[in-house]
Image: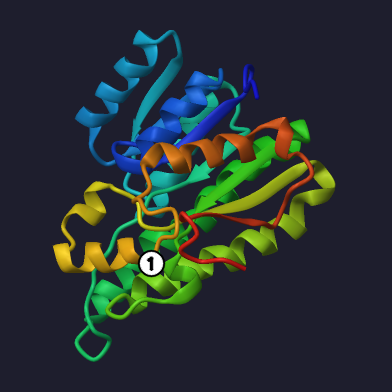
Amino acid sequence: MSLSGHVALVTGASQGIGRSCALKLAERGATVAVAARNQEKLNELVNDVTAHGGKAAAFALDVSDEEQIKSVIKSVIGQLGKIDILVNNAGITRDQLVMRMKRADWDAVINTNLTSAYLCIQQAIGSMLKQRWGRIINVTSIFGQIGQAGQANYASSKAGLIGLTMAIAREVASRNITCNAVAPGFIETAMTTVLSDDFKQKALEMIPLGRVGTPEDVANAVAFLASEHAAYITGHVLNVNGGMLMG
């Protein structure tokens, strides 16, 4: 599943799933543009990629800022020549019961998790159309499929990503561009380490494979969807959840 000759942009790449995706795509031969707010962590990631013989470049980016998205994607194309794999991974949580949820927390999650994906696709799609080849992969969540109490904003943003994935897939399929989503279940990341032990135990009991997922489990799915092996797959949501949700 070589990705040699391709340029990938991964948002939210400084840690967790995004970092693993960047490493995996680079391992497969892609030149990787890594974007996130934390420049120091991005620089460490670039060093890790190059130390293993890969190619990567770091771009500081707050995906909640439309002008930054436009500027960074223009810079990526200018520096690396193109973008033909886009991984929309950046995401945040601002959990609260809906009766207490502040509008600012709703807006922050929708803007970061959903609106940014639309904006990144909009800015990167021209490069893909020009070469008549592209892979767009949106990282959604099992909670966008089944909902989660206290996460009305997060679940809505991730469900929205699924709808966006299918709409974009229909729009660009004739140009040999696919658009798919990966829906992680319970994955061991910085975002999940803050959850209570009781919640983690209950979640584990719901996973038929009997273990929590790793960022690399998700990265393997992303790398597959970015490859030629997935050329006839589009508008699909690939569940990476250990059987937590089936069907």
Q: Is residue 196 visible?
A: no
Position in image of residue 10 (x %, y %)? 45, 37
Task: Return the residue nearer the eye: 21 or 44.
Answer: 21
Q: In which quarter of the image is residue 225?
A: top right
Q: Residue at x 69, y 38 (%)?
A: 134
Residue lying furthest bottom in this view? 99
Q: Residue at x 22, y 78 (%)?
A: 96
- Quick check: 153 above or below 180? below
Q: Is residue 198 left or right of residue 240?
A: left
- Quick check: 113 above or below 144? above
Position in image of residue 176 (x %, y %)? 79, 41
Task: Return the residue nearer the eye: 98 or 1.
Answer: 1
Q: In this view, does 194 lie to the left or right of 14?
A: left
Q: Mark 1 is on which residue type?
A: Met
Q: In this view, does 93 lie to the left or right of 72?
A: left
In the rendered image, which quarter contains the N terminus?
A: top right
Residue lying furthest right in this view? 174
Position in image of residue 190 (x %, y %)? 22, 48
- Quick check: 227 above or below 26? below
Q: Name the residue under label 1.
A: 206
Q: Residue at x 45, y 13 (%)?
A: 54
Task: Return the residue nearer the eye: 227 or 243.
Answer: 243
Position in image of residue 153 (x %, y %)? 35, 74
Q: Residue at x 66, y 50 (%)?
A: 179
Q: Is residue 98 visible?
A: yes
Q: In this view, does 42 lie to the left or right of 143?
A: left
Is label 1 in a helix, a strand or a loop? loop
Give the mark count: 1
- Quick check: 178 above or below 85? below
In the rendered image, which quarter contains the C terminus?
A: bottom right
Q: Sort mark 1 into few (<14), some (14-19) or many (20+) by Cα contacts within 10 Å.
A: some
